[in-house]
Image (cartoon, grey):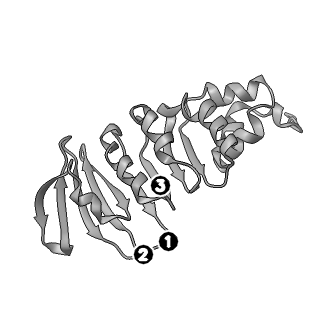
């Protein structure tokens, strides 16, 4: 009969189990807790191919800058979700410099972010090849939904501001009369459908 080995230290867990633990934690919390423990944990963060989901809400500016320098910028190609909900963080300073490297970003959620930042981000959405969801919520109020059809895959882009339909870089397209939807055709071949949505 095979005896089961007792593991009483986190350092004795396999990398696969540690990655599963990281999935249950907010990524920047896992980073804060484990990154500086030892070389093995630092390597787990730096040398992994596992997709990253970033949720930044309450974090100090210095911790955010450290996290951005050590995880977000060098691993932008692994990030599949970014949720920013800290009004003290300028999302443009974070997103626009790395936008072209966010090749796996499918979901971008901006909570309590000012409209002037949203406009700058929308102007750079064309750099995100697989983006299927953009959400802006402000105090959980009513928002507008942009449905995006790209490369045969249907996804949803949500944005609080209806001004996105009037963007200069969006050319008016056909209008769908059912459900009061109106489309905008983008130069890159993406079709965005604007529709009102209930909160």
Dot 2 or dot 1: first in sequence order is: 1
Q: Which mark is residue 57?
A: none
Q: Is residue 150 left or right of residue 108?
A: left
Instruction: Pinpoint residue 46: horizontal percent, then vertical percent.
Output: 63, 27
Q: Nearer the viewer, residue 29 or 21?
A: 29
**Which residue, given by chain and number where applicable, does mark 3 sit on?**
109
Against 153, residue 17 (above or below) is: above
Residue 24 position, x and y percent, is 66, 50
Asked if residue 144 is positioned above or below residue 16 in the image, the reply reads below
Where is residue 183, by image quadrant?
Answer: bottom left
Find the residue positioned furthest to the front. Answer: 116
Residue farthest bottom in this picture: 198
Q: Is residue 167 left or right of residue 35?
A: left
User: Could you tell me if the residues under marks 3 and 1 are in contact, i.e. CB atoms within 8 Å?
Assistant: no
Residue 3 placement, left or right of 101: right
Q: Nearer the viewer, residue 114 or 171?
A: 114
- Measure how far apart labels 3 and 1 are at the Cα level: 12 Å
Query: Count of labels shown?
Result: 3
Report helix, strand or loop for mark 1.
loop
For the residues labelled 2 and 1, the Cα–Cα distance comes to: 7 Å
Mark 1 lies on residue: 140
Residue at label 2?
199
Q: Nearer the viewer, residue 52 or 12?
A: 52
Tell me the quarter of the image containing the C terminus.
bottom left
Whether tag 2 and tag 1 are in contact, CB under 8 A, the answer is yes
Disc nearer the start of the sequence (3/1): 3
């Amino acid at each position: 009969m095979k005896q089961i080995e007792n593991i009483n230290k986190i350092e004795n867990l396999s990398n696969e189990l540690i990655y599963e633990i990281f999935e249950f934690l907010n990524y920047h919390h896992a980073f804060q807790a484990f990154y500086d423990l030892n070389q093995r944990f630092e390597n787990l963060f730096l040398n992994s191919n596992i997709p990253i989901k970033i949720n930044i809400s309450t974090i100090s500016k210095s911790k955010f800058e450290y996290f951005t320098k050590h995880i977000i910028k060098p691993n932008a190609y692994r990030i599949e979700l970014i949720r920013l909900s800290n009004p003290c963080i300028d999302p443009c300073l974070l997103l626009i410099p790395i936008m072209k490297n966010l090749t796996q970003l499918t979901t971008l959620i901006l909570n309590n972010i000012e409209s002037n930042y949203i406009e700058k981000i929308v102007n750079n959405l064309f750099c995100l090849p697989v983006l299927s969801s953009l959400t802006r919520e402000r105090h959980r109020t009513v928002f507008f939904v942009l449905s995006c059809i790209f490369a045969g895959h249907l996804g949803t882009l949500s944005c609080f501001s209806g001004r996105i339909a009037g963007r200069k870089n969006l050319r008016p397209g056909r209008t769908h009369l059912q459900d009061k939807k109106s489309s905008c055709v983008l130069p890159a071949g993406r079709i965005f459908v604007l529709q009102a949505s209930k909160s």
